[in-house]
Amino acid sequence: MNWLAHVFLSPKRIEYQLGNILADPLKGKCWEEASEDLCKGMRLHQVIDSFTDAHPEVHYSKKLLAHKGALKGVALDILYDHFLSVHWKHFSTKKRERFLNQFRIRALKASGGYPSEAKSLIQRVVENRQLDSYAQMQGVKEAFMRIDNRLSEGLKRKDGMMGYLSLIEMHKAELEASFMRFFPELMQRVREEVSDALFDHWEVLS
């Protein structure tokens, strides 16, 4: 899952959300003065990723992206943020723009005293408006281009993000339907993992 999904799947407490974002770049390691919520957010990130990686719908979607393979998981993560944006009203009781605006304001305030690496990453996410950049497929395309520009020459010879766009276009209806089956199950798994937390920004799914 990509950053928007990780923020959405967190209890609506800013340190929890930031921990979920920072888990990958900081390799799941809290710094000494980090809050309990931030460390919990990092642990929840791992639960989300493990459930996602093992889910049959995700395996099915990866098969649809039958390209070279090294980056298909990355492509799918970004595409899932797109589908979450498109279907936001199905999953959330809060308007997406209001939810993200509140997150941006709180994120900058909360991260002010973080170590430099964590602080600068949160600032980039907020200032580049990355959490709402995938609402349109053009944003997905631009993200793929940015990733390709950062790839090493060795990886470029094996795979590239832009090669997935034609496959996504070809199978978009199937990929979207698969996401809609998968994501409520992921929400339920998170609710089970964090049973004592409030998810008042979630729509109650039957």
Image: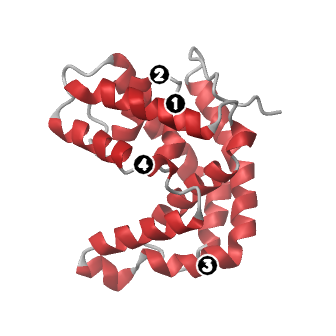
* Horizontal arrangement in the rendering, residue 30 relative to residue 202 (left or right): left
Q: Secondary structure at mark 3?
A: helix
- Label 1, on which residue? 10
* Horizontal arrangement in the rendering, residue 74 relative to residue 94 (left or right): left
- Residue pictured at 68% horizontal, 57% vertical: 57
- Residue pictured at 68% horizontal, 34% vertical: 92
Question: How far separated are the C-alphas under marks 3 and 1?
Answer: 31 Å
CB of mark 1 within 8 Å of CB of mark 2? yes
Please tell me the numbered disc located at residue 124.
Answer: none
Looking at the rendered structure, the kind of residue marked 1 is Ser
Question: How far separated are the C-alphas under marks 1 and 4?
Answer: 19 Å
- Label 3, on which residue? 167
Q: Secondary structure at mark 1?
A: loop
Q: Secondary structure at mark 4?
A: loop
> Which label sits in the foreground, 1 or 2?
2
- Label 4, on which residue? 129
Q: N-terminal of the two: label 3 or label 2? A: 2
CB of mark 3 within 8 Å of CB of mark 2? no
- Label 2, on which residue? 13
In percent of width and height, residue 156 lies at 32, 81
Residue with the most extreme bottom position: 157
Q: N-terminal of the two: label 3 or label 1? A: 1
